[in-house]
Amino acid sequence: MLSPPRRWIRDQSPSSVASCVRRGLCSRRHSLWILIILLVVCIAIQTFVARQARNDKQTGLPHLRFTVNKQHLFPTVQNVWEGIQSALASKTDMKSPQTDRTADIRQQNEGYRKQLDYILSKHVDNLAADSQTEARRVSAAKLLLPKHAASLGLPVPLALNNTRDIFTPDTHNPSSFLKAHIDSVSTKATCHPKSHIVFLKTHKTASSTILNILYRYGESRNLTFALPLNKHSQLFYPFLFASNFVEGVSSRSVREFHIMCNHMRFRKYEVAKVMPRETFYFSILRNPVAMMESIFIYYRSIPAFHKTHSLDNFLNNSWKSYNSSVTNNHYAHNILAFDFGFDNNVAPGAEDLEERTSAAIAAIERDFHLILISEYFDESMILLKHALCWSLEDIVSFKLNSRSEKTRHQLLPETAEKIKRWNALDWRIYLHFNASFWHKVDSLVGQEQMKREVSQLRELQTEMANSCLKDGGAVDPSQIKDVGLKPFQYGAAVIQGYNLNPDLDRQTKIKCQRLITPELQYTDRLYTQQFPELAAKHRQETKAVPPRRQRSDRTGRAIPGRAGAREAHYRQTIRRKFSNIKNQKAPSALLTHPDANNNTSMP
């Protein structure tokens, strides 16, 4: 008798049996293939994670950990998908299990420290380019060292455990990541030094010292300067700037200009014709009260001041002695606004004063990346250092074109208030950018770091002074031994200079000499280096003109007779090149510089 199964098969029709067998076999085969595929996927994921962990170990990055539960060796499709998501999230967040973090931190801190500078230098520039996607990708590869965590007020263990949260940039302002967290790292690791620079050199604001810094930086790196035409020291101030004022523009003998820093009356769209698009623009302001006292002493010969006995006397009768249409009187009224290219002739009680002030401030903020403050010169240099990505050695300086204390006068509070009313436009501009300066300090450097770096800068300058200077500081012009290092003397001011130590080696002497070279001599030397053929031509033209009788300044020192030849050449150039300027609307643009006859540049 047959067994039941066989009897069941025998009782069924051949076609039914075959159909059942096929269904059974196919169903089992389908399940088997699914299990095989899932197994392969799991093995591939484990292999990928293991390989990534080995790579991370070699590069000093934290290990990626992917733990596969035994009960999920043959998981469902949903479980496998959840595992893949978990693995990807683990890779993105760069997180490891909490139980392994403490051991990893101790073992890998040294590796992090070696790799951080490389990682930052490779990725941080892309992050600053306001790309949110790039920021998220880069943030996963950065680690905050304990010493940087402490500077941010974070507990040291959190420096590594909360990497993702710390380095997540602000979606509304991606560059805030740099401002908040990267400034504590070395300059070279975070950004590249800027070499395309425009400095609007304002009057009596310590701008000659900044000019020397820019000259030294550019000369040591063989950069090209946008120097004034025909070997002048100014870009034909007080004319509104035009691109053809720059030597090499019209002749196209210079393909690229790096630095523009001589006196000009600013006009952005003309400057942009000369300088590249990525150029960094900055300038410096000074309290109009102190600046007015300095201007009154320095420019005492201008018509507005000539007949007044004191600054108070001028301020009490300003509208009687001041005539805006008279040559050179712009020095006496809102000179900062004038240098920035605005109309400086606005009465203190004018109805449109606030409107004009707001327009001027908005234009300056639009055209300039940074405005420095003369009263906080060392802090300004640190801020400039961070903005340009320069080193501390690049911004070290000695005061140039500085007056002797003998010619400084203490102002009464009543006089200060008069100056604020007379220069109401300048005063409002200064107040605004004095406040914004400290916002820049807080956002780019920080108060504590600013104090440290200012202290370091002053120590370095003291060391340089002890090394370079014979007398350890500035001396009156009568005591300067090297005639080539004497600053130009003008007005009633006594402009001090320096003497070098006699026992300097050649290399140190060159470095120290650059630090104390006055503006006129340095500009002349750079022009000769940059345009040797034109410089030789100008020398020949100057010699061909009979020199006038030498005259003496108020200190009794003779001014070279060659100044007469320069005066004639300057006036001839003005008449030939700018005769059409008389048709311009602004009458202040037709002024002539008081020192045109000496080809000087007044700081």
Image (cartoon, rainbow, N blue to C red):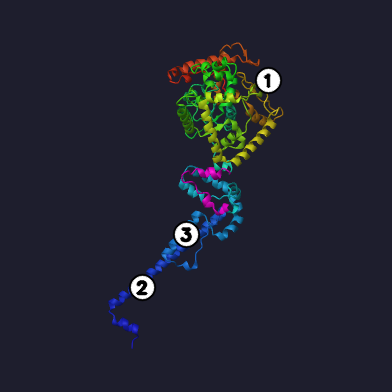
Disc assigned to residue 86? 3
Mark 1 = which residue?
478
- Kindly report which numbered mark, 1 or 2, lies closer to the viewer in this rendering: 1
Per the model, the C-alpha gap separating discs 2 and 3 is 35 Å
Counting from the top left corner in percent of width and height, residue 259 is at 53, 30
x then y, percent, for residue 324: 49, 18
Q: Which residues are magenta?
A: 158-184
Quadrant location of the C terminus in the rendered image = top right
The residue lying toward the viewer, choosing from 306 and 90, is 306
Disc 2 marks which residue?
A: 25
Q: What kind of element bears circle 3? A: helix
Marks 2, 3: nearer the viewer: 3
Residue 36 placement: quadrant: bottom left
Q: Residues within 10 Å of mark 1 (few under 14, many from 20)?
A: few
Residue 253 locus on image (x, y percent): 49, 26
User: What crowding class fits label 3: few (fewer than 14 Cα within 10 Å), some (14-19), or many (20 or more)?
Assistant: few
Contact between marks 1 and 2 (CB within 8 A): the answer is no
Q: Earlier in the sequence, mark 1 or mark 3?
A: 3
Q: Specify whether 378 is left or right of 501.
A: left
**Image: 513 above or below 143:** above
Tell which of 589 and 394 is nearer to you. 589
> Can see residue 523?
no
Which structural element holds mark 2?
helix
